[in-house]
Amino acid sequence: MRKQKTLVLLFIFALALSLLPQSAFAAKKKVKLNKKTVTVNVGKTVKIKLQNNKKKVKWTVTSGKKNLKLSKKKKTGVTIKGMKAGKAKVQAKVGKKKYVCKVTVKNKTNKSSVATQKPTRKPVQTPAPTGKTSSQPTQKPEAKAVELLTQYDDAIVAKTSTALSERNLSFYTLGQFGKISVKLSDGTNKELHNNNNIQESSYSRFSITGVDTTAAGDYNATLSYTEGAWSNTNTVSKQIKISVAEEKTNEQYSYISNGEIAQVNAIYSTEQSVHIPDTIDGAQVINHYCDIYDNPANKQIRDNQITAITLSKYLRYIPQATNSLFSIGYSLDSSYSWLSLKEINISDENENFSSENGVWFDKDKTVLVKYPCAKADTEYQIPNTVKEVRGGALRNVIHGFRKIYIPASVESFPCFEDDYNVSNLSEIEVDGQNKNYKSQDGVLYSKDMKQLLLYPFAKQDVSYSVPEGVDYIKDIIDVQHLKNIVLPKSLYRIYGYIQVENVYIDQTYDWYQSQQNAYHWVLERIIWNNTTIYVRDSQLRDYFMKENAEQLEKYHTTISEVYNW
C-alpha cells in the first residue's frame, strides 16, 4: 500500500513538471561561434555559424581584409571565401558582444594523384632488379646560410648609462659593417644589407653579443644573423670588434674614437659650408651626419643654415634614419633640418659613395641617396645608371625642380613627401621602356596602371579623374591646387589619405556590401574637413550618413547624391 502511494506521488510530480514551460528550468543557451579557427584554400569557401543567435549581427573582417571575402551574411552564420594566402580575422558583433574567428588562407595544393584502375589484363611479371637504381627526380633542398660575410669587421658606439640590448646594439652599429651577405650552402652569396639600405632582411634578424655599452673599451663580440621563423631557423655568426667610447669635445668637434675609427657627433662652426673631417686624432671618420652648432658652449643648432656639406672620404654607411620613407632621426633627409642645403660633396677616394653636381649617389651611381633640399634645378633627369631612388632622397625638395624624369633603369622610386607644402613638382615623366612605372598626365602610376603612386604636389589642375582600372592609391595629400577628385569604380584601397574639397565616389550600396566593407577603408582615408563627398547611389549615401553622423557633423562634412559629374 505504501509502495503504491509513493508511485502515485511520483507520477503526479512528473506530470506537473511536463506542464511547466521549458524556459522555467532550462538555462538560456549561450551565443557562440561553432569554430574559433578555420582554414580555407584560395578560391574555396568555408562556413562558420553563430550558434543560438536571434539578434541582428554585423559581420566584418578586422584584419587581413585582402585575404578573404565574406558573403551570405546572416544572423546565424557567414560564408568565407579565400582570396589570397595569409592570415585574417572575422568578427561577428551582436550589440556590444564580439565573437572572433581566426582564418588561415592557403594556396591551392596541386597534388598529382594517380587514379586507381581495375586491371584489364593479367599482370605482367616484374623482372628481377639489375642492381642499377633508376633516377628519380628529387626536389632540390633550399640553400641555407653557412657563413656570415661583412665588408668591415669593426664598429664604434658611444658609452651609455643603460646597457643596450643585443638588438638595439645591432640597430646602432650594423651600418658600420658596410655590405653584409651570407654564403649559401650551394656556393652562392646572398646580400642581406649594404651601405645603402636593408634589402632582404631587417634589423630584428641581427644581434650582437659580448658587449657592455656602460663600460668603455674594446670588445671581441659576435655578430649573428638568423634566417627562417619559428622552429625552422638557422643562425650564422661572425667575430667582430666593437669599441665603446666616451664622447670627447674640443673647439671644433664632439666625437667618439678608438684611435682607428671615429664618429663625429657635432661640428662647431659659424660658416654656411662645413666639412666633416676625414680623420680626427688619426682615426678615420666613418659617419655621414652630425649636427652643426655655433659653439660648444651655446650649442645653437645651425643645420637649417648650412648650404653645402662635404662628407668624409672614409664614409662607410648611412644610418637607419635615411633607410626608410619617414625619417627616424635628424638626418640629411629629415623634415626638421638641412632645408637650406644646396650641395653635397664626396671625395673621389671614397670607396662606397660619390657625388655628381651636388647630388649624393653610391659609388657606381646605381642608387640616388640624397638630392639637396634647396638645390635650384627647374628640371631633374635621374641618371640612367640609377636603379634605386632612396626613400628620403627627394624628401622636402623645396623651391626645386618642377619636373623630374625617371629613366628606364629605375626599379624602385619612393612616394616621397612634402612636409612644408613648398614643393614645385608639377610633372613626372617616365621613360616608356621602364618596366615598373608609367606616367599619365604627369602623374606617376605602376606600369599596369593599377596603382596611383604619386600625384605631383604643385600640379596645376583643379580637378582630376583617376582612370578606371586603378584599384590602389598611395595618397593624395599636401597638394596645392587640386580641389575635386573623381574616384573610379575599380578603387579598392587608399594606403595613405586623400585631402581635397570635393570627392566623387562612383560606387553602389550593393557593391559596398558585396566587397566585405572594403570601400569603408576608402571613406576612412578621406580627410573630413569641410569636405563634400558625392555619390550616385542614394542608398549608399543614406547608409554612410547614418553610420558616420557624428563624425560628419564634427568635421563639417556632407555626403550628397548626384547623378552626373
Image: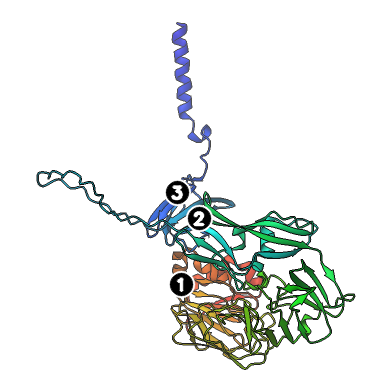
Residue 78, percent across and down? 44, 54
Mark 2 vs mark 3: which is more N-terminal?
3
Q: Which of 66 and 524 is in front in this view?
A: 66
Expressed as whole percent of the image width and height from the top left, the position of residue 140 reads 38, 57
Amino acid under disc 2: Val
Which secondary structure, mark 3? strand
Q: Which of marks 1 and 2 is nearer the N terminus?
A: 2
Question: Where 340 falls versus 38 (above or below)?
Answer: below
Q: Which colour scheme is used?
A: rainbow
Q: Name the residue under label 2.
A: 90
Element assignment for label 1: loop
From where the camera sits, is residue 505 visible? no
Label 2 element class:
strand
The answer to whether the residue labelled 1 contacts the one labelled 3, judged by CB atoms less than 8 Å apart, is no
Could you give the CA–CA distance between mark 1 and mark 3, rounded to whole angstroms? 28 Å
Q: Residue furthest top?
A: 1
Q: Residues within 10 Å of mark 2 (few under 14, many from 20)?
A: many
State the CA–CA distance, disc 2 to disc 3.
12 Å
Left or right of 453 in this view: 173: right
According to the picture, the residue beneath numbered tag 1 turns out to be 508
Q: Which residue is drawn at 53% across and 52% down?
A: 233
Disc nearer the start of the sequence (1/3): 3
Q: Name the kind of residue labelled 3 in the image.
A: Lys
On residue 49, the disc is 3
Give the crowd class for mark 3: few <14, some 14-19, many >=20 residues within 10 Å: some
Quarter of the image where the N terminus is located: top left
> Mark 1 against mark 2, which lies toward the viewer?
2
How many residues crowd around disc 1 within 10 Å: few (fewer than 14), some, or many (20 or more)? some
As drawn, is 225 to the left or to the right of 214? left
Residue 266 is tagged as none
